[in-house]
Image (tube, rainbow, N blue to C red):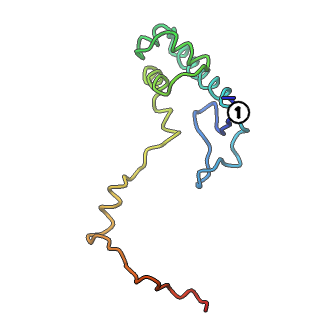
Amino acid sequence: MGGDRCYRGSSRDWSIAFDDDQTPSASAPPLVSTDERERQVGEQVRRLRLDQGLDQLELARRADLSPSTVQSLEAGRGSTLRSLVRVLRALGADDALGNIAPASAVSPLDVLRSSGDEPRRRVYRPRGARSSGGGS
């Protein structure tokens, strides 16, 4: 069944609670089924749309989607990530997805470039030679 996976997160602020080790935190809200999470996201999209005084037809036009796609998204019925992103952009709320995967403050290339002038070198050890770990 498609709704048996559960995630932790907040349905009010689009955030997902994780500890530093990328496991859901103990203070996270109770587990929510995938189906329920889709319904919650759809309800949030609906509230954003209504807060801006838009009907589904106008939102669909702004997002370059069919009205039935917007209806399905708001109902929590199997919409695509692409459709969600388009709708959020049309509502001026595409930054909401930043809570899921925030941009890194430092790019990996910058880290490599700032690690020193000399390139790293591999250390080769003869086969069979092992570091003495305190045992014989």
Q: Which residue is at 57% across, 15% downward? A: 72
Front residue of 125 and 11: 125
Q: Is residue 132 above or below residue 1?
A: below
Tell me if mark 1 has few (under 14), some (14-19) or many (20+) residues whose alpha carbon lies within 10 angstroms of its own: few
Q: Which residue is at 65% across, 47% downward? A: 24
- Given the current orientation, which residue lies at the most extreme bottom position? 136
Count of residue discs: 1
Q: Position of residue 115 (x, y in %)?
A: 33, 66
SS for dot 1: helix
- Given the current orientation, which residue lies at the most extreme front position? 127
Q: Position of residue 11 (x, y in %)?
A: 64, 31
Front residue of 36 and 91: 36
Front residue of 132 and 51: 132
Q: Is residue 32 above or below residue 52?
A: below
Please tell me in which quadrant of the rendered image residue 123 appears.
bottom left
Front residue of 76 and 92: 76
- Given the current orientation, which residue lies at the most extreme left position? 117
Q: What residue is pinned by disc 1?
A: 4
Q: Position of residue 9 (x, y in %)?
A: 64, 38
Give amino acid for label 1: Asp
Q: Is residue 112 above or below residue 133?
A: above
As drawn, is 47 to the left or to the right of 113? right
Q: Position of residue 70 (x, y in %)?
A: 52, 14
Q: Which residue is at 45% across, 29% downward? A: 94
Image quadrant in which the C terminus is located: bottom right
As drawn, is 72 to the left or to the right of 104? right
